[in-house]
Image (cartoon, coloured by chain):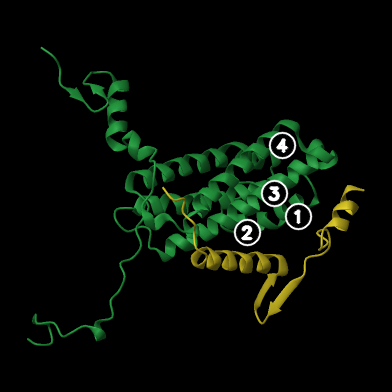
Amino acid sequence: MIWSAVETITAVGLNGRAYYIHWGWFQISAANLAVIVAMVVVFALAIVVPFRRRDR
Amino acid sequence: MTTPVQPGGTEGSSWTGALRRAGLRALPPEQLLPDEQPVYVASWVYVFGVATIAALFVVIGSGLLLAVEGPTWWHTSSVGLFFNSLHLWSVELFFFFMVIHLWAKFMMAAWRGRRAMTWVTGAVAFVVSIGAAFTGYLSQQNFSSQWIASQAKDGLNSVGIGAFFNVLDFGQMFTWHVALLPLGIVALVVVHVLLVRKHGVVPPFPAKTDTRSQPPSPLPTARDS
């Protein structure tokens, strides 16, 4: 019951078989690729987004 | 006759006093707990180290509760499932922030200025964390952990460590996961942070000037000789 509720409220079903992306010899799960892309995006944002300092 | 006062108190023969004075010489209080940081630290790219430590606090807190309550609790009760998920997602964030921290420090060449050990302790903490995560997957007590253990044993046996690190032995893996590896990670993180306090946050690379727009130097160069 809990798992069905979780599946209902999540956009992606987390209990199914993992989806893999194949590119020649290279293979990666979509979840791992999404995490890597998210890390690159957050890293880029951390460099370009200004950091507001508290005025002393 | 009075004894001259040394940093950390008067000289004495006790090992506790010597340890205190050595600690104060290595890390004076104002350096250990500074009020402010250099201006170049005012960037979002510098927050991922402390974000990693914050995630580690949640990992350890949720892990302590899981260890106290046990597998039946974390697999069947709703509160147990919540803390099981909290433990997993805090680990995800721990690695997420740690990898970005690693990228940022690599780009800055953060081992510059006698900071080699700071870099090394961070890198070793990363490797030990992978072991802690791996033994965590083995400690789930479900089909997933059995599958991971049965796959991993062949790889570990092929490099000759299966007899000492038996992934099919739940008791051994659970002990590694809840005691040995967390202690190692915490110790490495403490040393890492103390080294950052001792040597300071690595400054950015100096700005490069465009030499083509500069007037020719009056000083002789290698090409002139």
- How far apart are the two marked residues, 3 and 2, measured between alpha carbons? 24 Å
Q: Which chain is green?
A: B
Q: Residue at x 27, y 28 (%)?
A: B21
- How far apart are the two marked residues, 1 and 3, measured between alpha carbons? 18 Å
Secondary structure under tag 4 reads helix
Q: Chain of mark 3?
A: B
Residue denoted by label 1 = B147
- How far apart are the two marked residues, 4 and 2, measured between alpha carbons? 29 Å
Answer whether labels 4 and 3 touch (C-beta < 8 Å): no
**Mark 4 Cα within 10 Å, few/some/many (few <14, many 20+)?**
many
Q: Residue at x 51, y 48 (%)?
A: B50
Q: Who comes first in sequence, dot 4 or dot 2?
A: 4
Tell me: A43 left or right of B27.
Answer: right
Residue denoted by label 4 = B66
Residue most extreme to the top: B1
Same chain check for tags 4 and 2: yes
Q: Which amino acid, by three-letter code, is at mark 4? A: Leu
Q: Who comes first in sequence, dot 1 or dot 3?
A: 3
Q: Which chain is yellow?
A: A
Residue denoted by label 3 = B88
Secondary structure under tag 2 reads helix
Q: Nearer the viewer, residue B83 or B54?
A: B54
Answer whether labels 1 and 3 touch (C-beta < 8 Å): no
Q: Who comes first in sequence, dot 4 or dot 3?
A: 4
Q: Residue at x 80, y 43 (%)?
A: B81
Residue denoted by label 2 = B155
Residue A9 figure quarter: bottom right
Secondary structure under tag 1 reads helix
